[in-house]
Amino acid sequence: MRIAYLILSILFWATAAFASEIREFDLKTIERLGNELTRVSQTRDRGATTPERKRARETAMAALRGNVLNIHYDYVVLDDPAGDGFLVYALGSTGKSGQFVLGGHIRVSVSADGRIVKRIDPLSRTLLIEDEKNTGLPKDTHLVGSYYNQIVSNKPVETLIYISNISRRPVLVQTPDGKIWQIANGKMSIDRSKPGSETMGGAARKAFQQ
C-alpha cells in the first residue's frame, strides 16, 4: 500500500515583516498548553473546577456568542501562563467519527476573577476540517499525516498539538516566515527536509512550493 499525505491548505497571506496576529508563547509553553488541552478536554469538567474557573468559562462563552462558526464547541479552561488569569479555549468539533477540526478554534484570555475578557485570539482565519474517511486520496494509499498552512503566527498554535494528539497523526505546518514545523507526539520542531525527499517533511515542502 502506498503512503500518501493529505494536503490541507488555506490561503497564505505573508509579508516580509510579519507581526503575529495573536498572543504568542514560547515553544515549551505552546507544547505544554497543547498537551494540557488534550488531557483536560477529556475530563468531565474540562478544567472548570473552581467558581472562578467556571465563571471564566461563562464569561468567554458570552463574549463569543454569535461570533463562532457553525460547528459544535467545547470550552476548556487552562491557567494563563502569565499567572494572572485563565485561558479559555473554544475547541471546535463536528461530532463525527474520523473528522478533526484543524482550523476554527478560539482562545480567550480571561482575568483571574473570571469576570473580564482581556483578549480574544482566533487561532485561524477559517474553518478547516480533516475527514479521514473522505480524503479524496486514491484507494491504494494510506493517510499518515496532514499539511497545514497557518497564517496567524510564526509559531504553530497549541491547538495543532491537540489535534495531532487526538488524531494520532503528525501535522506539518508552514508559517508565514516560510518555516515548516513538524508536530508529533506532543512535540514540535522545525523540519529541515529537502523538497521531494522521501520523508513527510520533504513531501510537505515540495507541496508548499507548488
Image: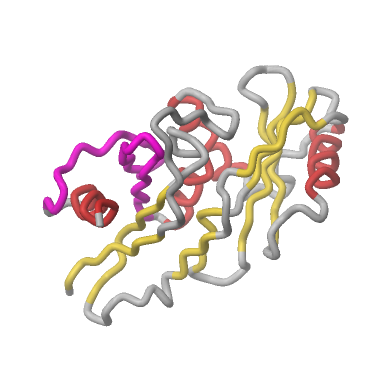
x 59%, y 33%: residue: 22
Quarter of the rendering containing residue 207:
bottom left
Residue 152 vertical position relative to residue 163 in the rendered view, above or below: above
Q: Residue at x 29, y 52 (%)?
A: 208
Q: Quadrant of the C terminus?
A: bottom left
* Furthest residue toward front: 16
Q: Find the magenta span and give its range.
A: 169-197
**52 left or right of 88 in image:** right
Task: Please say if 46 is above or below 147.
Answer: above
Q: Is residue 17 left or right of residue 59?
A: left
Please name the residue shown 66% across and 47% down the image: 43
Most extreme residue toward the left, as rendered? 197
User: In the rendered image, which quarter contains the N terminus?
Assistant: bottom left
- The x, y position of residue 108, in whole percent, is 71, 37
Q: Nearer the viewer, residue 156 or 207?
A: 207
Farthest-out residue, top: 83
Question: In this image, 198 relative to 191: left or right?
Answer: left
Q: Residue at x 54, y 45 (%)?
A: 38
Q: Is residue 38 above or below residue 2?
A: above
User: Which residue is situated farthest in the bottom direction here?
Assistant: 139
Q: Is residue 162 magenta?
A: no
Coordinates of residue 34 in the picture (x, y in percent): 51, 38
Asked where in the image residue 16 lies, by quadrant, the reply is top left
Give x and y (percent) for residue 44.
71, 50
> Any magenta on residue 188?
yes
Image quarter for residue 8? bottom left
Q: Is residue 187 left or right of residue 130?
A: left
Check the image and report above or below for 120 versus 98.
above
**Which of these two is toward me, 36 or 139?**
139
Residue 40 at x, y percent in the picture = 62, 42
